[in-house]
Image: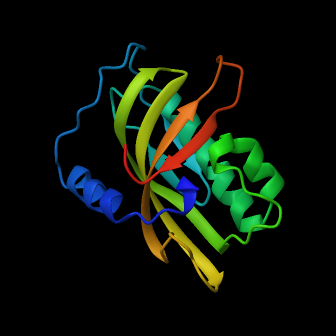
Amino acid sequence: MRLLIASAIAALAFAACSSGGSSTTSTPTQAPASATISATPATVTLRPGDPAVYGEGIARLQQYVDAWARGDKAFMNEIVGAEDDIQSGTATPQLRDGRITSYQPSSYTSAYYFTLLVGLELHFSSGDTAAWGEGTNSRFVTFDRSDASSPFTLTFATSP
């Protein structure tokens, strides 16, 4: 399960992107918009020129993190793609709280399909955190939906 793969490579890539490294991002075909989205408990502000749909995707990711903190595997499975589906008997790290702290565009196909390198601050209650670490984490998250009225499905990876 890609969700539970170690993220050493992604952490290095995230650090490079966050420190001003260049990105090989496609130019969005949607008109640019600037917006602020609320991500519990913090706020992530979209950069000028980034598509507003990034805010929708980040909000959906925060819903996933909040469901994880509640231990709501059924809702988590509604949000993720089949390859990241959490089986009912599978142990998952017990998340106490988490929030999205940053994002970096990775690829953009359309408002219905794009990938972001996302920074997350995660805190666990106890036990094995699996491939997630206590504190700062990063993952490539692909956001996919069939149309503007459908919610995004998320797929996690440690590399693009």
Q: Residue at x 36, y 19 (%)?
A: 28
Is 22 placed left or right of 147 in the picture? left
> Would you identify the image quadrant in which residue 92 lies?
bottom right
Question: Quadrant location of the C terminus?
Answer: top left
Residue at image coords 57%, 77%:
129
Tell me if 17 is positioned left or right of 42 in this view. Answer: left
Q: Which residue occupies the foreground of this view, 17 or 42?
A: 17
The outermost residue toward the bottom is: 126
Q: Nearer the viewer, residue 52 or 88?
A: 88
Residue 145 rendering spot, x and y as whole percentages? 63, 25
Using residue 48 as the reference point, say whether residue 73 is left or right of it: right
Above or below residue 49? Residue 135 is below
Q: Position of residue 71 (x, y in %)?
A: 78, 66
Q: Quadrant of residue 4?
A: bottom right
Q: Indicate how the structure is coloured in the image.
A: rainbow
Residue at the (44%, 66%) spot, across then down: 6
Write the residue at 54% across / 69% down. 122
Residue 88 in the image, given as x and y percentages of width and height: 83, 61
Q: Residue furthest left?
A: 21
Taking depth in this image into account, of 24 and 119 the one nearest to the observer is 24
8 w.r.t. 135: above or below = above
Q: Is residue 145 above or below residue 61?
A: above
Image location (x, y in percent) of residue 50: 37, 29
Question: In which quadrant is the N terminus drawn?
Answer: bottom right
